[in-house]
Image: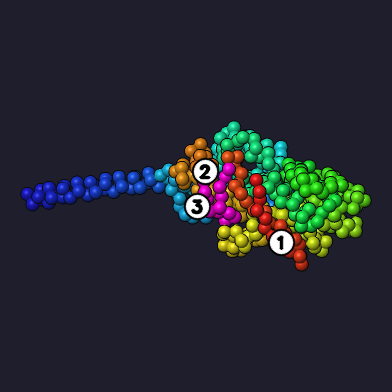
Amino acid sequence: MKYSNITIGIIPLLCLALSACGKQESADTATHTTTAEEVVKIGAAAPLTGPQSHLGKDNENGTKMAIEEANAKGLIIGGKKIRFELISEDDQADPRLGTVVAQKFVDQQVKGVIGHLNSGTTIPSSKIYSDAGIVQISPAATNVTYTSQGFKTAFRVMANDAQQGKVLGYYATHQLGGKKIAIIDDRTAYGQGLADEFKKAVTEAGAQIVAHEFTTDKATDFMSILTKIKSVKPDVLFYGGMDAQGGPMMKQVRGLGLTTRFLTGDGGSTPEFIKLAGADAEGAYSSLPGVPLAKMPGGEEFGARFTPKYGQIQLYAPYCYDAVNVMISAMQQADSVEPAKYLPKLAGITHDGVTAKINFDEKGDLKGGMITLYQVKNGQWEVLETLETKP
């Protein structure tokens, strides 16, 4: 009987223990349900090889830093812990390859794309993303066409060529006193687009276009076209293109004895331009959408985190960082990582970014914006002034 009493006494205890285990298991299951991890793929495209690879890596690093910081926060979206995965592709600044990369992102079912860097790759890829319903935010492509195609999935976080070209035209004629203007562009969507907007602004200001020559984004020898330009004696020479050509061109300008003022856009506003032009870079002018890093709302703090990890900022890294964060902010507001659900939130978003307060207009362009003018002094780009863009 004694043994039976002990046995009988144990049974309720076992039942209680099993019940408690069941409750704990249910609790664990519930916790697991609300914190199940979902991997969210974000695509990023830029030239990671070739003459623009330093810019492409800068873009990749800005994107990577934003994604790593987001993952460290352990964000919960749609009841799941989100881990963002960066899929970075090299489009080599080649429009044909850009569309191949775009289709690859579609096949991999990315939830958004940061890119492309060049207008020439951004524009043709934008239709592929639009057809697939994938959000695309370019941190660098400035050609007006990109957001003028009517694609609801297309956005950019910096001023476009119409805004920048207008300011450059004003600066060339009013601040630099240009009456006779020569232009060279590299025939890419970016270089030609910016040169055309600059030309329009200069003509409206009453200046004379005395030459408009063309090169490519692969060229290194510009002596023939510069010799033609020298004969018409321009006050200002404007180059629409990237630093890989702009730097050597500046060196050859001075080598020919041309004393004309040299002006270029954001593609040349880099440390690499100065490196390639050497001492002949001195006195060159450039522009860059936005305000200088030190005057950006979060610029100095961004630089303090970025530079020790990735080195000197080349150009667009802060804009890539903002592009990622504005996309993630829209996902959080929609409580979904699906583009169809967070796209409406993105279109109407107000985001306090590193570079600026980000709001988009009906086309997906950044509302308002500033353009900053720079000049090479003592081997560095120094700020001259910041001008507000006008509609």
Residue matched to label 3: 71
Asked if the residue under mark 1 is in contact with the one under mark 3, i.e. CB atoms within 8 Å, the reply is no
Q: CA distance from mark 3 to mark 2?
A: 25 Å
Could you say whether the residue bearing mark 1 is in a helix, strand or loop?
strand
Where is residue 196? Give x, y as percent: 76, 43
- Is residue 279 in view from this perspective? yes
Q: Is residue 291 above or below residue 327?
A: below
- From the image, state whether disc 3 or disc 2 is nearer to you: 2
In the rendered image, the residue lying farthest to the top is 131
- Is residue 243 in view from this perspective? no
- From the image, state whether disc 3 or disc 1 is nearer to you: 1
Residue matched to label 1: 384
Look at the image and give the residue range highlighted in magenta.
Answer: 348-361
Q: CA distance from mark 3 to mark 1?
A: 38 Å
Where is residue 281? Give x, y as percent: 80, 60
Amino acid under label 3? Asn
Work out whether residue 236 or residue 293 is closer to the camera in this orientation and state it: 236
Q: Looking at the image, tell me whether mark 3 or mark 2 is earlier in sequence order.
A: 3
Amino acid under label 1? Leu
Residue matched to label 2: 348
Where is residue 26? Give x, y as percent: 30, 45
Asked if the residue under mark 2 is in contact with the one under mark 3, i.e. CB atoms within 8 Å, the reply is no
